Image (tube, rainbow, N blue to C red):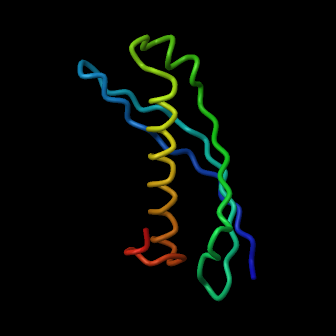
Amino acid sequence: MVWVVEKKVFYHILDMGFESVGIPVRVKFEFDVQDGRLVKDSLEVESIYNQPAVVRRYPGVKKDVLEKEIQTTIHREIRKYLQNCGYINENIE
């Protein structure tokens, strides 16, 4: 059993119609690996980005919608990472 800690920067693309913005999100995620596979329910994720600056620069953006979209991006990128490393199968939800 091995506990893996990764720190990555993922970019959430915010499409404003007139402009696309890449928002950098620092992510730290930890998980347990046993026999080369991710242990179910062991994934822990922490993230940080400058939400006040994004909302200030783009007043039409709602904080709750932005947060939900960014969390979706984070989980998609972590899933890609885990699949590329062989910790999970590609068809697992």
Outermost residue on the left side: it is 17
Residue at the spot 42% in from the left edge and 19% down from the top edge: 61
Residue at the spot 69% in from the left edge and 61% down from the top edge: 30
Q: Position of residue 11 (x, y in %)?
A: 46, 40
Q: Position of residue 14 (x, y in %)?
A: 37, 30
Outermost residue on the bottom side: it is 35
Residue at the spot 65% in from the left edge and 68% down from the top edge: 41
Total numbered circles: 0
Q: Quadrant of residue 19?
A: top left
Q: Quadrant of the N terminus?
A: bottom right
Q: Position of residue 63 (x, y in %)?
A: 51, 23
Q: Position of residue 39 (x, y in %)?
A: 65, 76
Look at the picture and state if 18 lies above or below 48: above
Look at the picture and state if 24 lies above or below 17: below
Q: Quadrant of the C terminus?
A: bottom left
Judged left or right of residue 90, residue 19 is left
Say which of 12 and 41 sits in front.
41
Residue at the spot 62% in from the left edge and 46% down from the top edge: 27
Judged left or right of residue 59, residue 9 is right
Look at the picture and state if 89 lies above or below 50: below
